[in-house]
Amino acid sequence: MTDTVTIVECPRDAWQGLPQNIPTEEKIKYLTRLVSLGFSHIDAVSFVSPKHVPQMADSEAVMQHLSQVKLASGEAPEIIGIVVNEQGLERALAAPGVTTIGYPYSISAYFRRANANMSKLESRNLVGTIQRQTKTAGRKLVVYISMAFGNPYDEPWGEEIVEDALVWLKDVGVRTVSLADTVGTASPEDVAHLYRAVKNCVAGLEIGVHLHSRPDGAAAKVLAAYESGCRRFDGALTGLGGCPFAGDQLVGNIPTETVLATLAARGVSTGIDAKSLAIACAITGELREKYAHLPAASKPS
């Protein structure tokens, strides 16, 4: 039997730290094209303060159009909308076409405060609220465990801390979790060790990875996760983006093309053919060329 995986394309993560805002019409055109090319799981928007992430100020407008887009099968794609508080949750649940709510739950106290200004208890209470409301609304939920592979803040970290978070998430009803290497410092060995250590600690959880990396280390991390049992991978075409609060411009999302090539070498079916991938990389490159650089007037002299 051919092995299959879930590939989650993450333009939202790729775009949120760009120096120039992408016009709403271009976002709609791009996301629509991705769906037509067979990308069926897309982390497309976030419902956060435009003051902090101005690139995402138009999420409702984007979803008004994207909600009408279907895959070749006639089914709606999975569209993930990220939230960090109850106001964002309310917006996401009101937006048409958002099938899945995503929430970043940090096991680093420092990062949780910097990114969401919440205590551990406040964040856990919010997850409970999100889980209940998404279930009532008939939406799915994915929780990202931020700093899952360690942190640069000299805070306590270990597989037992990740296991505690996974057990708690299972207990409150979460069924899909993604382990995030937020600052991209995990080695392939780190990825393999953690995934193997926690993958069986809670039965019934789908555990994926959302890895960041410098380009030369990306393939090895993907392979390490796959060979450890992971079957859900986040990526971003051309490797653009990464957490805008993490601090290293060379650490971006794992390129989707690297994910697909690495898995294809293992005979894995991803649902994205070579022609579609080439087109997707080309249109991503066009956006990157236009918006990933400071405008001339803003460049330091």
Image: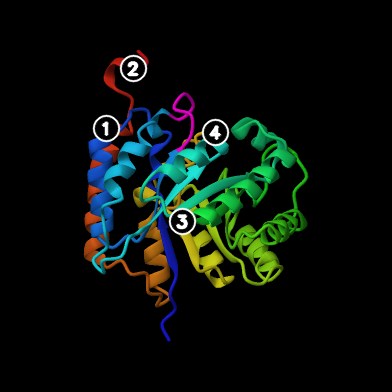
CA neighbours of label 3 inside 10 A, class few (<14), some (14 to 19), many (20+): many
Q: Residue at x 35, y 33 (%)?
A: 58
Disc on the earlier residue, 4 or 2: 4
Q: In this picture, which residue range is highlighted in magenta?
A: 47-53
**Which residue position is annotated with label 1?**
23
Name the amino acid, label 2. Ser
Mark whose residue sits in front, 1 or 3: 1
- The answer to whether one can see residue 295 in this image is yes
Q: What numbered label is drawn on residue 298? A: 2
Quadrant housing residue 12: top left
Q: CA distance from mark 4 to mark 2?
A: 21 Å
Query: For the point 59% across and 34% down, which residue is it?
Result: 115
Q: What label does residue 245 carry, if any?
A: 4
Look at the image and say whether residue 252 sits in the magenta stretch.
no
Residue 136 appears left or right of 166 = left
Q: CA distance from mark 2 to mark 1?
A: 18 Å
Q: Nearer the viewer, residue 219 or 135?
A: 135
The residue singled out by tag 3 in the image is 234
Q: Position of residue 270 (x, y in %)?
A: 37, 69
Residue 285 in the image, given as x and y percentages of width and height:
26, 44
Disc 3 marks which amino acid?
A: Asp
